[in-house]
Amino acid sequence: MYIKSLQLKNFRNYESLDLPFDQGTNILYGDNAQGKTNVLEAIYLCGTTKSHRGSKDREVIRFQEEESHICMRLIKNNLPYKLDMHLKKHKPKGAAINGIPIRKAGELFGVVNLVFFSPEDLNLIKEGPGGRRKFLDLELCQLDKIYLSNLQNYNKIIIQRNKLLKDIVFRPKLEETLDMWDAQLLQYGKQMIAKRREFIWQLNEIIQDIHASLTGGKEILELKYEPNVSEDTYQTALSGNRKRDLKMRITATGPHRDDLCVKINGFDIRKYGSQGQQRTAALSLKLSEIYLVKKVIRDTPVLLLDDVLSELDSNRQNYLLNSIHDIQTFITCTGLDDFVNNRFKIDKIFYVSNGSIR
């Protein structure tokens, strides 16, 4: 799988852009705040419908413009694909695959498999559980359409149930309708828990060898899924916590409260690990994500590295660069010294300056 080209119109600081890419390593370099990350954001948004920055559609549209357009052409399983994403300030986004409009933006998930790695991801271990749940969900959504559907439905029900909990204060009779929402939560939530458990098991099979190589065999890394509630106890816990939910006006039980524990040599590094151990474990997570995607889809994903090399020491830089030689990769950086020093093969270089690329 590889991306052939990207066309942008009125996206961020680009009025118009047409870039052909190489199947290997594509470097975008230049000073900060020139538009390098915007290119990676456009690729990610076109493939997943979401900005990796969490930006809203209207925020990525060029200043004083009403609409933005992203067009990405790729080859997957020797077949050509054309993905179009239309972003509008005051209307929902529109998307098309090979010129055919799609009803739900989520249908784009899985057409192109993307692994995004930014400096913020190096803090994945030490920050709150929300980031670790996002890590699980983003990859599972690309690999499993059923999981994507379950997650979307679950999130909608959580929003509706929380609204109902607030309304019950003023209209107590509405409490009778909670059973209906709880039944749907259980339906989708149990499937999410089971899939997350399986995903962590699959990652564990891959990540231990990667982390051992990164640390010279000194550390054994283990991922442990920490569900807020198990499939077997979900219904009992949800019913038992109803009074608390009514009092707090929020749903406190379910996979939206899950977490992922990372252990090194048996110790939880969220609590007892050094910053270096936490960052190395995050790198291992991202690399294992690449290998798992290869295994599941029997193809290579596209890797987006946003200014990550500057955050890694030479040993981790070398390991990362040596791990991606067979994957189409997009790398942003402020200079080319790291690649020259490591004698890393570069296939195409783009110089980015003030919204123009050559």
Image (cartoon, grey):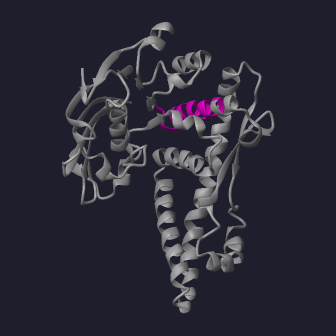
296 or 190, nearer to the observer: 190
Relative vertical location of residue 34 with respect to residue 63 in this rendering, above or below: above
Q: Can you give x and y, in whole percent of width and height, for residue 306 in the image? A: 44, 30
Which segment did they paint magenta? 280-299
Residue 282: in magenta span: yes
User: Looking at the image, which residue is at 39% across and 45% down?
Assistant: 51
For the stretch drawn in magenta, what is the main secondary structure? helix
Q: Quadrant of residue 212?
A: top right
Q: Is residue 173 left or right of residue 280?
A: left
Q: Nearer the viewer, residue 222 or 280?
A: 280
Horizontal side of 285 relative to 113 (left or right) equals: right
Q: Nearer the viewer, residue 326 or 250?
A: 250
Please, is residue 101 above or below residue 218 in the view? below
Count of numbered tags: 0
Image quarter of residue 18? top left
> Which residue is drawn at the image coordinates 24% and 20% (left, top)?
358
Image x and y of residue 344, in percent: 47, 11
Q: Residue 316: say if magenta.
A: no
Residue 262 placement (x, y as % from top left): 70, 40
Which quadrant holds residue 80? top left
Q: Camera-side residue: 137 or 62?
A: 62
Quarter of the N terminus within the rendering: top left
Q: Residue furthest bottom?
A: 173
Q: Position of residue 213 (x, y in %)?
A: 67, 21
